[in-house]
């Protein structure tokens, strides 16, 4: 059943999203030196909710595609959602800003590759990944700046 495929991708996104609930920013994050362009805390769950919905629907569309790029695209999708899930525990849980920067760099590459393969398999799915790549680019810049400004 096609709906079970969508539910599976949504479940993977919900599992990744759950790390945000397990490792909230908290007092430690509030004390960090952050750039002026840091978004307010309330924006993160809102943005991620929209992005996770888009990611799940994009993967669903590709899973139903008969294009040869679909299999590779879904493999990269699985890789990026795993990286997505571990970034939060590393940054907020372990408070390892440099390690989180390495993870988000790998996440950016995985999202970019997923998007390219999704564009080949299904144009709409590729477009659904574009805001995600933009957000991860922004988040990587934020992670880098916070790491740089809080090395002590």
Image (cartoon, helix red, strand yellow):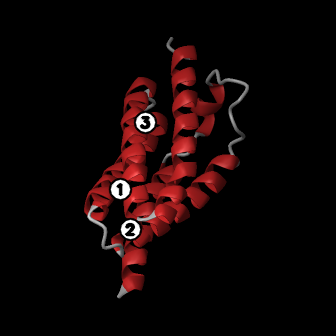
The CA distance from mark 1 to mark 2 is 10 Å
**Residue count near mark 2 (Cα–Cα under 10 Å), binned few <14, some 14–19, many ≥20:** many
**Image mark count:** 3
Whether residue 11 is visible to the viewer of this picture, yes or no, is: no
Residue 18, x across and y down, in percent = 47, 57
Residue at mark 1: 77
**Secondary structure type for disc 1:** helix
Residue at mark 2: 62
Q: Is residue 91 above or below residue 1?
A: above
Residue at mark 3: 104
Q: Quadrant of residue 10?
A: bottom left
Which badge, 3 or 2, is on the more N-terminal residue? Answer: 2
Whether residue 147 is visible to the viewer of this picture, yes or no, is: yes
* The N terminus: image quadrant: bottom left
Question: Which one is nearer the viewer's eye here, 108 or 144?
Answer: 108
Label number found at residue 27: none
Residue 14, x across and y down, in percent = 46, 64
Residue 130, x across and y down, in percent = 54, 50
**Secondary structure type for disc 2:** helix
Question: Which one is nearer the viewer's eye here, 115 or 33?
Answer: 115
Q: Which residue is at 43% across, 71% downward? A: 61
The CA distance from mark 3 to mark 1 is 15 Å
Instruction: Please indicate whether residue 22 sits to the left or right of residue 142 in the image.
Output: left
The CA distance from mark 3 to mark 2 is 24 Å
Disc 1 vs disc 2: Cβ atoms closer than 8 Å?
A: yes
Which badge, 3 or 1, is on the more N-terminal residue? Answer: 1
Instruction: Please indicate whether residue 24 sits to the left or right of residue 115 in the image.
Output: right
Residue at the top extreme, as displayed: 152
Q: Which residue is at 42% across, 84% downward? A: 3
Instruction: Please indicate whether residue 60 sits to the left or right of residue 67 in the image.
Output: right
Q: Which residue is at 53% across, 59% downward? A: 128
Which badge, 1 or 2, is on the more N-terminal residue? Answer: 2
């Amino acid at each position: 059943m096609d709906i079970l495929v969508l539910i599976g991708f949504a479940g993977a996104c919900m599992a990744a999203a759950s790390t945000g609930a397990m490792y909230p920013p908290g007092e430690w994050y509030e004390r960090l030196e952050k750039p002026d362009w840091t978004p307010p805390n309330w924006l993160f769950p809102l943005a991620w909710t929209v992005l996770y919905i888009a990611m799940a629907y994009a993967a669903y569309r590709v899973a139903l595609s008969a294009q040869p790029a679909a299999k590779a695209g879904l493999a990269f999708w699985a890789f990026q959602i795993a990286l997505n899930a571990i970034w939060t525990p590393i940054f907020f849980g372990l408070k390892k800003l440099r390690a989180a920067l390495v993870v988000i760099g790998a996440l950016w590459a995985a999202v970019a590759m997923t998007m390219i393969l999704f564009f080949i398999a299904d144009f709409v799915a590729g477009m659904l990944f574009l805001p995600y790549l933009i957000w991860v680019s922004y988040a990587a810049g934020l992670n880098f700046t916070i790491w740089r400004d809080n090395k002590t």
